[in-house]
Image (cartoon, helix red, strand yellow):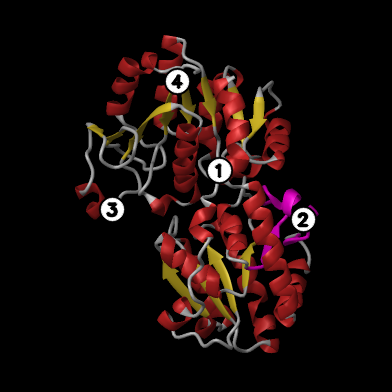
Amino acid sequence: MPTQKRVLQVSPAYYPAISIGGPIFTNLTFSKALEDINCQIEVVTTTQGLSKAQLEQITVGEKSISEFSYPIWRFPFYGYSNFTFSPGIFFWLLKHTRQFDMVVFQAVWNFPILAAYLACKWHKVPYVVIPHGSLYDETFHLKSSKFKRFFFSLYVKKMLMKAHRILFSTQDEELKVKKFLSIPLKSSIIPNIVDVQKFDNLPEKGTFRSKFSISKDQIILTHFGRVTIKKGINFVLEILPELIQNYPTIVYVIAGSEEDNYINELRAIIEQKQIEKHIIFTGLLSPNEGIDLLADSDVFILPSLSENFGMSVVEAMLCEIPVIISEHVGIAMDIKNEACAKVIKLEDTSLKDALMDLIADSNKRIEMGQKGREFAKRNYSYEAIEIKLDQLINR
């Protein structure tokens, strides 16, 4: 029997910090996949994204073995939440990194990743980097670009070039990042893993509609994920008045936690367009509430400016909901070839045209939803990804 490898995952945040969005769930499924390929894993992280109630239920600053089937260490952070400065993680990594055969960096720009890089360099432990879309040209310049340029010159460039592998989630991400950075990188494509079993038994239709007083005859257009500028929600709001003229019962549900008070900007657009009665903000939903929403939706929309993968897209597909995504979503190339989604450009009328086409044809929505579910189960399950991961970690 092959020797069991010890793998450490370093992440600025970890489940149940679901307010962070998709990466929290991909970190969790990645951990399970590592266990399934016979790795002995531990996780070190900060308290980022945890509510007061959640903090009361977990151990901080000490090893916890009660939350998961593997140990997890959580340390407090200080200052800017997106940098997650944590002295506790730094000293823990300096002491313990040498005990592991490989370290997985589940981010790029955060302090825990800098600390892990220094510890791996000191102890000569190989590491892989999962950037979660943070190295795209668009995301590089979208927020804190001056700091990113400084960090890139200081250590990120060397960190990426010396990595055992950079793990991209799609071919789109790999091609665009390599072109943008123009540095030699050893990379592999490991798609994000979705726990498809959660979608085996979908809830009875009407659960979400009943809770929010939406009739069965109304058309629900859905955004499910973080409410940020890069998600392209504003593109939907701009064309919504024209859609409402043709379909007066449309409701656009915007579900998820916000960043940078972006909802105030959206509300200004909504007020200017006079479409208040057609918009529902739900705030952050639990995983089960999210499935209730997707199961009741008619069309899922993600006209994103940049998206390395699109976890919520796959979840919508698993709920047999037709999806419309921009060409900037990482999995666009894959699902467009399978005719299980509409892939649109942001510069023309293709978003409006795609919505009008699907709203008008319920049979087309059903057919696309069925194709999407089959494609998602075939390509993003544990079984589909673990073979690739085993070759990377254990070979």
The residue under the point 55% across, 27% down is: 152
* Within-10-Å neighbours for mark 2: few <14, some 14–19, many 20+: some
Judge whether residue 329 is colored magenta: yes
Magenta span of residues: 321-344
Judge whether residue 176 is colored magenta: no
Determine whether, in the image, residue 20 is placed left or right of residue 372. left
Which x, y percent locates residue 15?
37, 46
Q: Are marks 3 and 4 in contact (CB under 8 Å)?
A: no
> What is the spatial separation of the Cα atoms under label 4 and label 2, in whole angstroms?
39 Å
Name above or below for residue 68 compared with residue 329.
Answer: above
Give the residue pinned by disc 4.
4
Q: Amino acid at mark 3?
A: Ser
Q: Are marks 3 and 2 in contact (CB under 8 Å)?
A: no
Give the residue pinned by disc 1.
382
Q: Amino acid at mark 2?
A: Lys
Q: Amino acid at mark 1?
A: Tyr
Dot 1 lies on which element? helix
> What is the spatial separation of the Cα atoms under label 2 and label 1, in whole angstroms?
22 Å
Which one is in front, 109 or 300? 300
Q: Amino acid at mark 4?
A: Gln
Q: Are marks 4 and 2 in contact (CB under 8 Å)?
A: no
Dot 3 lies on which element? loop
Which x, y percent locates residue 92?
30, 22
The residue under the point 46% across, 48% down is: 25
Give the mark toward the camera: 3 or 4.
4
**Quadrant in the rendering for residue 80:** top left
Q: Are marks 3 and 1 in contact (CB under 8 Å)?
A: no
> What is the spatial separation of the Cα atoms under label 3 and label 4, in whole angstroms?
35 Å
Give the mark toward the camera: 4 or 2.
4
